[in-house]
Image (cartoon, rainbow, N blue to C red):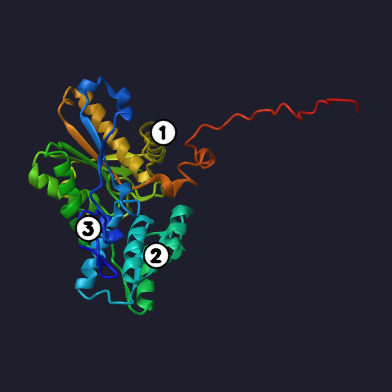
Amino acid sequence: MHLIDDAPFPATMDYADSILDLVGDTPLVRLRRVTRDLGPIDRQPLLLAKLEMLNPGGSVKDRIALRMIEAAERERRLLPGGTIVEPTSGNTGVGLAIVAALKGYRCVFVMADKQSEEKRALLRAYGADVVVCPTDVPPDSPDSYYRTSERLVSEIPGAFMPGQYWNLENPRAHEATTGPEIWRQTGGRITHLVAGAGTGGTITGSARYLRSRCPDLVVVGADTEGSVYSGDTPRAYLTEGVGEDFIPDTIDLSVVDRWMRVSDGAAFQAARAITRTEGILAGESSGTALVAALTVVRELVESGGGAGKVVVVILPDTGRNYLSKLYNDEWMRDHGMLEPVEPTRVAIGCGRKRGPA
């Protein structure tokens, strides 16, 4: 029972004690419209999307942020009044900023310059300081966001870096929460798990738990072009929050049965499609995962083995952070992902005189 001014409220009241209590337990929703062209419905598997954008901070990263900070507090690596420093594509930063707001920590986040301005503004809205670094530099460059973060930790008294790329609380968070939730929500009938990989914590932790319950589970990793996970040569790409140019400590490659490489264009088009057909405002990495999931569905239909299968795709974040990019038609055209618009002549003011001179 919660008390305010020493006056008890009825036990029948239903509310969370803080926003942190609302992390996790995200729902599954069936996707029907994006699969319409993939074959007869009775030959399709059940395609379910786990909506991680419904976490308080709008992404799957809320789960790891809370777990990493609580572990650091238990181990006395983060003390009252300390500063959280983290290299992030934005979503982990938001999760950490929410935790910090309730626990009284200062935050400094280091981001690559390809990340959307919405993400930077969101972090600042929570009171965080944001440092922007160039994208197109090697991870060991002193200008990279990894090395810049390390330097800031050494310079700021009481600073602590959760280190989502090496902190094993990252995959453990998903092994403890995301995987069990999917198992419960599907009644143990999941046959295929599709997820993208940035740090790799989501796919690693979720797959570990689910495979402990279902050894025949097929795990498909969605990767972006220019990322090493699917064996590509590291190079710049536009999709945020997925792919890497090195192998973090937080990913267990052995849990992934198959990698699917997805282009920026395909990911962005898929995100826009699910928004406009299913009403799910999806981010860029969600588009990457969706492309891989639809490929799985198509292959199952074509092989005749789709009926009775259950495919779960994890959609990691919301599209609200990408309104200036993914959902900006002009930006999409500038980057070759939408057809250019033919110029039109306005009827008024095209050079004809409309009255006496």
Q: Quadrant of the N terminus?
A: bottom left
Label 1: state its secondary structure: helix
With 105 as the anchor, is 329 left or right in this view? right
Q: Residues within 10 Å of mark 2 (few under 14, many from 20)?
A: many
Instruction: Name the residue located 24 percent from the left edge and 36 percent from the top edge.
Output: 48
Residue 124 figure quarter = bottom left
Residue 75, relative to residue 136: is it above or below? below
Between the residue at mark 2 and the residue at mark 3, the CA separation in whole angstroms equals: 42 Å
Q: Name the residue beneath numbered marker 3.
A: 10
Q: In this orientation, which residue lies closer to the viewer: 140 or 21?
A: 21
| Frontmost residue, 202 versus 232 | 202
Which residue shows up at 47% across the image and 58% down it? 121
Q: Residues within 10 Å of mark 3 (few under 14, many from 20)?
A: few
Mark 1 / mark 3, whichever is N-terminal: 3
Tell me where residue 65 sits by quadrant: bottom left
Q: Is residue 343 visible?
A: yes
User: Going from the N terminus, do you reach mark 2 or mark 1 first?
Assistant: 2
Q: Which mark is residue 109?
A: 2
Amino acid under disc 3: Pro
